[in-house]
């Protein structure tokens, strides 16, 4: 079973947002082109930057290493 990780990001209008994904959900959304964040405060949707994607993948890798996978 894949663990879910929570990520913090900021919308283009400066509002804080938390999102949670399993690594499988994250990679599937990336592959299908449907990975998008949504800010309920200002009703803005956006795709994560390449830097955010790299950071999320790093966190998944670190989490897997901690679990011994």
Image (cartoon, rainbow, N blue to C red):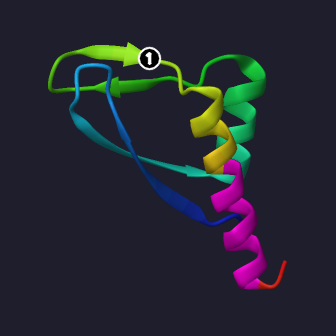
| Residue at (32% x, 27% y) in the render | 11
* Percent of width and height locating residue 68: 81, 85
User: Which residue is more in the foreground, 44 or 11?
Assistant: 11
Q: Which residues are magenta?
A: 57-67
* Percent of width and height locating residue 17: 30, 40
Inspect the magenta stretch and tell me whether residue 2 lies in it.
no
| Residue at (17% x, 18% y) in the render | 42
User: Which residue is more in the foreground, 59 or 67?
Assistant: 59
Extreme residue toward the front, this view: 51
| Residue at (67% x, 29% y) in the render | 29
Instruction: Classify mark 1: residues with Cα within 10 Å, few (<14), some (14-19) or many (20+).
Output: few
Extreme residue toward the right, this view: 69
Identify the residue position indicated by label 1 in the image: 46
Q: Quadrant of the N terminus?
A: bottom right
Q: Label 1: state its secondary structure.
A: strand
Q: Quadrant of residue 50?
A: top right
Residue 7 relative to residue 43: left or right:
right
* Percent of width and height locating residue 48: 54, 27
Q: Quadrant of residue 19?
A: top left
């Amino acid at each position: 079973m894949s663990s879910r990780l929570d990520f913090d990001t900021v919308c283009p209008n400066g509002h804080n947002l938390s999102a949670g994904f399993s690594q499988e959900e994250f990679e599937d959304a990336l592959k299908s082109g449907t990975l998008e964040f949504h800010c309920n405060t200002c009703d803005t949707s956006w795709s994560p930057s390449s830097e955010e994607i790299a950071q999320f993948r790093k966190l998944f890798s670190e989490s897997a290493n901690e679990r011994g996978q």
